[in-house]
Image: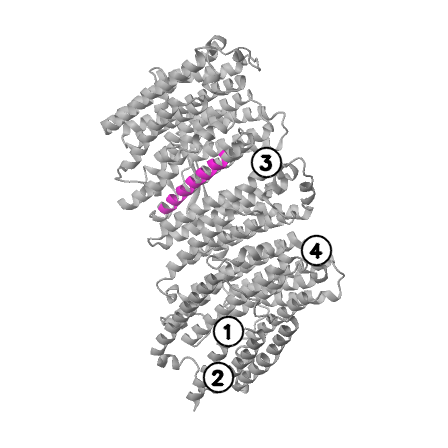
Amino acid sequence: MLALLLIIVPLLFALVLFACKEGGAKRIAVVGSFINLVIVGALLLNHNNPYLSNFQIDWISSLNASFHLQVAGLGMLMACLVALAFFLIILFSSELSYKNEQYFYGLLLFVEAGLMGVFFAHDALLFYFFWELVIIPIYFLCSIWGGEKRIQVTLNFFIYTFLGSLFLLAALLYIYSHTPDHSFAWESFTKVQLSVKEQRVIFWLLFIALAIKMPVFPFHTWQPNTYKESPLPVTMVLSGLLAKMGLFALLQWVLPVLHNFATPQLAIILCIISIIYASVIALQQGDLKKMVAYSSMAHIGLMALAIFSMNATAISGASLQMFNHGINVVALWMIIALLEKKYQTTYFTNLGGLAKTEPLLTLFFVIFMLANIGLPLTNSFVGEFLMLFGIFSFNKIIALFAGLSLILSATYSLGAIQKIFFGNLSEKNKHPLIASANARWVVGILVIFTLLILFFGIYPAPLFKILQF
Amino acid sequence: MNAIIIASLGAIILMLTNLFFRKRSKLLSVFALLVVILLIVFNTLEGQGLLFFYPASLNSAFFQFSNFTYLFNNVLILTFLIYILLNKNYLLLINPDHSADIYALLFFVMTGCFLLTSYNNLLSLFLGIEIMTIPLYVLAGMDKKNQKSNEASLKYFLLGAFSTCILLMGITLLYGATGSFALNPFNTLNTTKLLGQVGMLFIFFALLFKVGVAPFHFWVPDVYDGTPNVFTAFMATIVKVVVIIALLNFINALTPNCIGKSYKTIVLFVIISTLAIGNFSALSQPNVKRMMAYSSIAQAGFMLLALYALNDLATQGILIYAIVYSLSTLTIFAILNKFSLATFSDFNGLAKSQPLMACFLTVALLSLTGIPLTGGFFAKYYMLSATFFSGGKYALPLVIICLIFAGISAVYYLKVIQAMYFTTPPVTSDHASITIQPLATLEKSILLLVVIAILFLGIFPSIVTQWLYF
Amino acid sequence: MATSLFWLFSALAIFAAVMVVTSRLAIYSILWLVVLFFTISGHYILMNAQFLAIVNIIVYAGAIMVLFLFVVMLMNVNDPNDNKKSIGLAIFGGLATILFLLSILNIVFNAQHTTKEINDLATTSTGDIGLVQNLGMELFKNYVLPFEICGVLFLSAIIGAVTLGKR
């Protein structure tokens, strides 16, 4: 029941926002996302109560598809991330002003509803429905409020992801037609028996579908431009939450379906290429936005690699990292948003020496960047360590490459700190056009992120506990 | 049977109304709507077992009525009702001297459609096709002062007559092989003879020609483009869907192996080439109407998957596909009516100037793309699912190819949405604002209902399919 | 006697058909078409279908062809240089025609092996279904429904013609 509320509440608020005037939109959206956060909290406390955590009604009985939502470990963790991130993102977005705010926030809440559906759906058709529904509002968000080249970039993004989800549909339909009782239920999906050859075909279909979403190497070309051109709150959602959809689907819908299946070498190699390639490109980027985009791609590649290694330790590390990476990357984009707002640029060449004028921002940025690298005491450390450990016991050479990514990550992250906050302060940046001191509550949001990072770095047990749900 | 008789009677009476009604009389459309409502009532009653016209025992030799027939007839009639409600003003405007005749011809087409949903005999197939197409040739050329309309009419007539020749030749060959016009498996089951097979192939191809799928699609863009908008909407929805049902009836009645082992290969080739040609050509069209012509080719390719699968799921699927496709296409054409030329740039900034219109158009386009939450998703879903359940080693590759083309189709549908929502209209040209007429209140409410229906089918498709099993 | 007549009519029909296509002047084409209709009527008579034979001559050779003649004469479409066609079209058209002819011939020759089986199914030169009386009985008893529907078809065609023809 509560899971259903998590979908319905943002939808209702979205509809209210579409109907209302521009003025109070911000507040309504904040209230909506806060209510959702509260519900997630309630759900965390009541996850054992099946009346509250489970919801099932018949949907299309002739197809054996039901509207079935269930709270389970990873889904719950991701729902926490979604609710938390959306609340903070929407709160933060007030700092950036957009035209026709009511539609902007309405669509954002729409995305939240879709994401909740993706993470709770216990029925393949329902899962696919939400999976696809997430893209539509994103498409409108990017195309209306994005940067200069938004229309072409967004179309590119949409076609890419739409094609990807069609592959997903093909694979789900194929599995559905082979389930013993012709049902879309998750349980029937896990019972399906496919030959090795069939499994391989299905694996690749799903791989393409999910690799586009994550993204993994040859399917990543939509990502940097989309991250760059989207309005920043949407970029936060894209990189922090939407990218996790692919990993989540891999764990929830792909691995349980395949039995006695070893990941094809090529998939693992693609993940490795993805990690190294993205890291190297991130090293050479002159644009902070693109650097963070590629860094995100490298991290996601590592998580995918951990999952494909089919090692229990690596998988639990990846699950943990999905949460923590979401937090870190959203926090990083917030700093970028603040920088861009104030200095109208995110290119390294135009920035530099900001530590003198922006000590507070520097501090936060350094913390977030260190978390991004995965330094001990920050939240990503636990996940990365588990992943590397798992991959190491899976294959030592692959673990070598995975470890390399950490070194590269440290290089570009520290390089970025160096280039932006130290060095010479340009004349122009001494007197920025918008001489706004950051509002107190913006600092508050960043403090919340810092606390989250440090808390889960020192004491990750709650996260593991949620994963056990 | 009721539907056939009432439609033809309605046509004759409408023709005679020319004597009594003034030109452009609103009464004409009211009268037509009355006939349509009678059609629904009588067809539904017949489905419940109440026949008002029962020509002795001759019935079953030429027509066979099943649950599916009645249901599909009702779908056709409802679509026709929506069509008239959306286009009634334009039907009166297109050729004011002949508005009664136009209605009469439309009802004749409907008569042909009802014949085609229920035929059980090659003779009735032929008559159905002819009654359906001959008025269409005329309707295509209704805008007599327009060169393009004349051209469309002539092209349609010549190519249509040619395909009818092929149909006739097929019927002749089949008759030569079996000695009967009847279309039942007992008659044709043992027709392994080449003569009969070629006959069936000819009929098959002729019907494909009438649907307008590759490689018999060449007439479609020119004819759809030249024909006045109102009639293109009619041709692209009701007529197209009916011929596909006729094809399905034909193949189902024969057990497909009669056509030969290569039947599935042929269908495979037709589907893939249709999807390829339809989608790739639609990408580069200068105006929306022509794009819709190619998109209708592509959509027909999806509908043909029913011919490949040939199972229960396919029957359900074609029903949903027919409804959703017709509703979406009618919506789009109702909005195209408001434009004089409808190039892509005409749609720039429509979301600002006509938000409701843009919203309707968006739903219709997304439905044609096959996005979940719109009926189009389930239409495609059923087709693909049916293909999987029909099995065979080509099922998976075929589905993947279809899906890739569905992805490509998103490009040209989104082009319109992009123009409406993300592009601002050029400030200087004020002619753009003049050419777009606003929607009338009636049209608004009808379109709203249609859009709600599309969305509703996108969540509960079983609302339609359950009627099949009553 | 019947067999030799059959061959005669067949040969004449094919010759006339070829002449229809190859004649440079439209009027000649139409006249050859009339000849073709006469030979087909001959076939009908051989099949003991006198009514059809007469109707064929009256309607097609008589009414329709005369109408064609009038139209062609009035519109004056007899300039042989009018219809220049591209060589590519001719090659591909010819190729398609030849392939089509080959496949049809294939059918015909294949069908010959099974003529005996077909004999009792399809009506051949014997039989009296073509006589006016029997045809009438058939048409108005068993086939009355399609017959009526034909009426609808013609009505729609007439309305269409009038609508298009009226200014």
Percent position (x, y) of residue A379? Answer: 37, 19
Q: Is residue B144 left or right of residue A54?
A: right
Say above or below: A139 vs A375: below
Residue under label 3: B423
Which residue is at the front of the view, A434 or A263? A434
Is A126 covered by the magenta stretch?
Answer: no
The answer to the question of whether label 1 and label 3 lie on touching residues, with beta carbons closer than 8 A, is: no
The answer to the question of whether label 1 and label 4 lie on touching residues, with beta carbons closer than 8 A, is: no
Q: Chain of mark 2?
A: C
- Callout 2 environment at 10 Å: few (<14), some (14 to 19), or many (20+)? many
Q: Is residue B305 visible?
A: no
Classify mark 1: helix, strand or loop.
Answer: helix
Residue under label 4: B93
Residue under label 1: C22
Which residue is at the front of the view, A37 or B31? B31
* Amino acid type, label 1: Thr
Percent position (x, y) of residue A372? Answer: 38, 20
Q: Which mark is residue B226?
A: none
Report how far apart the C-alphas of labels 3 and 4 lie in the structure.
32 Å
Report how far apart the C-alphas of labels 1 and 4 lie in the structure.
45 Å
Residues at marks 3 and 2, common chain? no
Q: Chain of mark 4?
A: B
* Amino acid type, label 2: His
Residue under label 2: C43
Q: Is residue C59 visible?
A: yes
The residues colored magenta run A153-174
* Amino acid type, label 4: Leu
Report how far apart the C-alphas of labels 3 and 2 lie in the structure.
69 Å
Residues at marks 1 and 2, common chain? yes
Q: Main secondary structure of the magenta part?
A: helix
